[in-house]
Amino acid sequence: MTERATKKKKQPRRVQAQQPTAITAAQRVAIAELEYQRAQVDQVAYERGELLKRLKVVRRSLAENRLKYQTQAAQIKAEDELVSRVQQHINALLSFLGQSSARKPAAAAYLAPEDDPEIADWAAQHRKIEDELAESIRVRDSIHRTDRLPVIQLGEGLNSEISRLAIEEQNILNRLNNSLGKLSEGGIFGVS
């Protein structure tokens, strides 16, 4: 019997399988609340990821548009300066033309330039000023002028593309800083 008794002692005791207990209503509510909180965390993480993607796009567009605006604004300024210099030259030529007309010999009204060397000299100088004036006007009118409206729409004023992108960037940063869902009291006048 001693052998049997030792054999019985060596056999492990069988553990009775536990019966699944019914989930109470409170436990169901707690599980649902945990799942809801997990879904909220996932939603916030998703929205944050989307905002970060949008922020990258907005900042890239903002940098590109600022560079484009600065380049085009500098080009317009250079064109304006060139036109201004040519116009100043035209104004000087118009003044010279007026002075030349005032120095016109009185006999030029009756004699041909071929008949009098003084009239011929005056007519040649006057024609030279007229030709230079015509050439300067042609040069001024042939200067390429960048269309200003797209440049203004891009970078000037509150309704410009650059202003819109800057506002969008600030709105995204505000949403990211407020952790998506935390609302500060007082709206735009709230103190954080």
Image (tube, rainbow, N blue to C red):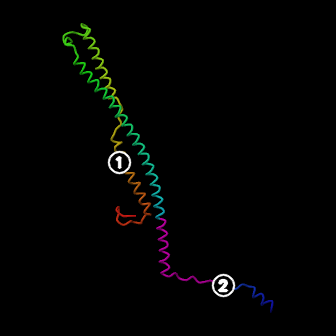
Q: Where is residue 177 in the image (x, y as percent from the top left)?
A: 44, 61
Q: Which residue is drawn at 30% across and 20% down?
A: 131
Q: In this view, does 111 lie to the left or right of 39?
A: left
For badge 2, the amino acid type reads Val
Percent of width and height locating residue 147? 34, 38
Which residue position holds label 1?
Answer: 160
Front-most of residues 9 and 152: 152
- Horizontally, is 5 left or right of 38 in the view? right
**The magenta stretch spans residue 88:** no
Choose between 145 and 86: the one closer to the eye.
86
Q: What residue type is labelled 1?
A: Ser
Toward the bottom, the furthest residue is 1
Q: Does the magenta stretch include residue 33?
A: yes
Question: What is the magenta segment's predominant secondary structure?
Answer: helix
> Is 133 in front, or is 172?
133
For image coordinates 34% across by 62% down, the residue present is: 189
Residue 86 screen position, x and y as percent = 33, 28
Q: Circle 2 is placed at which residue position?
A: 15
N-terminal-most mark, 2 or 1: 2
* Mark 1 closeness class: few <14, some 14–19, many ≥20 residues within 10 Å: some
Q: How far apart are marks 2 and 1 (CA)?
A: 77 Å
Magenta-tinted stretch: 16-42
